[in-house]
Image: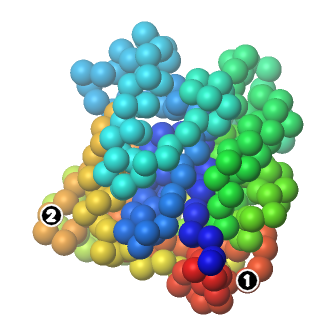
Amino acid sequence: MSAPRRLLVVHAHPDDETLWAGGTIARYIAAGVAVTVVTCTLGEQGEVITDDLRDLAADGADQLGGYRVAELHAACGLLGVTDQRFLGGIGRWRDSGMVAQPGARASAPANLHPRAFAGGVLDEQVGALVEVLEQVRPQVVVSYGPDGGYGHRDHIRAHQVTMAAAPRIPEVIRVFWAVRPVTAVADGIAALRAMPGLPFPLPWVDGAPGLPGVADAEVTTSLDVSAHRSTVLAAMRAHATQIRVWTAGRHAAFALSDGVARPVSDTEYFTLAHGRAAGSHDDLFGGLAQ
């Protein structure tokens, strides 16, 4: 008898599971796949977009992390996740915050919090993920690409930890990176332009930088998650300190702390980074025994 299908996703902060792979998580749970979500930090350094909760932020009461745990649990419940874990235990590593200075991707700045994920001991973090992987024994693991999707140092560290840990587990057959191809990004921005009454500014105006994306050729798997759009939107709304969601009929968009419009995609994209090639381009488990 073949082993049940198991998927493990590794994300840096609460809300990343929904923003990067919410449709995928919901799709596979609906298909009977056991999905484990590993979150590396509590998102303590996030900017709070809700006026009445802004004092929770790191420059105020510094209680945002605990609040975001509740948001994460709510979002995971909506997606159908029953196994959510914090890397190393809840609160072991702290959100490192965004950074603009050159060289930050290569080496952590000296002013990082002592528990900052990006400044932590890589071997310890890898060991913590290996422990989870040994318990779960997933066939498929998902995280970010080398740039973390958009350069956040916690995303980059999550990539490093995942790529060091996952190949050590014999049951892990494939590791994928969640990506956004440039064509899909451009199509999403075009769709935003056509939305009447969109309350957020567009991400591409008069030649200003838009949203990051990878070359289309890097995509190896595309998943149709349109059947789970309402679930993903509900999970986004659960992360109310971080995400504003707007809908009008079939139109949907969201904005983060920068206030810029982002499309809600009915397709989620992945790059195979490790392991045997998929038997199909529309299933992370394609060709694997069920």
Amino acid tagged 1: Ala
Residue 129, image quadrant: top right
Q: Which residue is mark 2?
A: 248
Q: CA distance from mark 2 to mark 1?
A: 39 Å
Judge left or right: residue 130 versus residue 194: right
Give the position of the N terminus as an image quadrant: bottom right
252 up-or-down from 66: above or below: below
Residue, x 37% and y 68% (percent of image)? 30
Please indicate whether residue 110 sits to the left or right of residue 73 in the image: right
Q: Quadrant of residue 147?
A: bottom right
Residue 236 vs 271, above or below: the answer is above
> Total marks drawn?
2
Residue 166 percent location from the top left of the image: 77, 56
| Residue located at (19% from left, 72% from top) | 250
Viewer-nearest residue: 100 or 216: 216
Residue placed under numbered mark 1 in the picture: 277
In this rendering, position of residue 63 left or right of residue 264: right
Quadrant, the C terminus: bottom right
Q: Residue furthest front?
A: 1
User: x and y percent of residue 256 in the render?
Assistant: 39, 45
Please name which of the two marks, 2 or 1, marks the residue nearer to the observer: 1
Residue at the limit of the structure toward the left, as seen here: 249
- Tell me: residue 158, above or below residue 193: above
Task: Report crowding for label 1: few under 14, some 14 to 19, many 20 or more residues within 10 A (C-alpha).
Answer: some
Quadrant of res 90: top right
Residue 145 horizontal/vertical position (percent): 70, 60
Colour approach in the figure: rainbow
45 or 94, nearer to the observer:
94
